Amino acid sequence: MHELGVLNSMVHTIERIVKEQNVTEVSKLVIEVGELSGIVPRYLEQSWPAASYKTFMEKTELELIVIPGIVKCKGCGRVFNAVYSDLSCPDCGSSDMEILEGDDMIIKEIVCC
């Protein structure tokens, strides 16, 4: 489960940034997680208490927004959600596709008190 490591790095980076801005508390952290990112949102939620333990973000609420894994079939051009289509084109059956969105994880918002 690499989600804990990802969160640990994120907490340390955010801590450094907000301290530079003289902020002492973050009330909420909003993260966008793509369905094709390789990050499991449920594991992020489960790992959050351990990643934020004994940091200035220990009481910070974590909000996750799941971004659909939208792809375009290189065979027929159809645009669809790859996860719901079992990673193959519902029209032609091809698994050769271009990812249009949903393959990354970003910090959407840091809400300070």
Image (cartoon, rainbow, N blue to C red):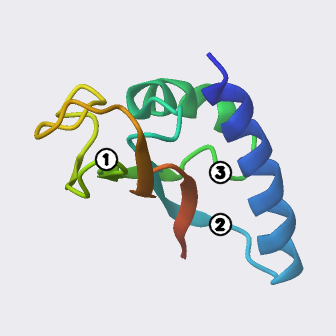
**Is residue 75 in sight in this rendering?**
yes
| Of the two numbered discs 1 and 3 in the rendering, the one whose residue sits closer to the viewer | 1
User: Relative to the observer, which residue lies in front, 64 or 101?
Assistant: 101
Q: Residue at x 74, y 77 (%)?
A: 23
Residue linked to disc 1: 75
- Specify the label residue 9 is tagged with: none
Residue type at the position of mark 1: Gly
Location of residue 65 in the rendering, given as x and y in whole percent from the top left corner: 34, 54
| Observer-nearest of 24 and 18 | 18
Q: Earlier in the sequence, mark 3 or mark 2?
A: 2
Residue depicted at x 70% and y 37%: 6
Q: Secondary structure at mark 1?
A: loop
Q: CA distance from mark 1 to mark 3?
A: 47 Å
Instruction: Mark 2: give few (<14), some (14-19) or many (20+) Cα within 10 Å.
Output: some
Q: Which mark is residue 57?
A: 3
User: Which of the two labelled residues, at mark 1 and mark 2, occupies the earlier sequence position?
Assistant: 2
Crowd band around label 3 with a 10 angstrom C-alpha radius: few (<14), some (14–19), many (20+): many
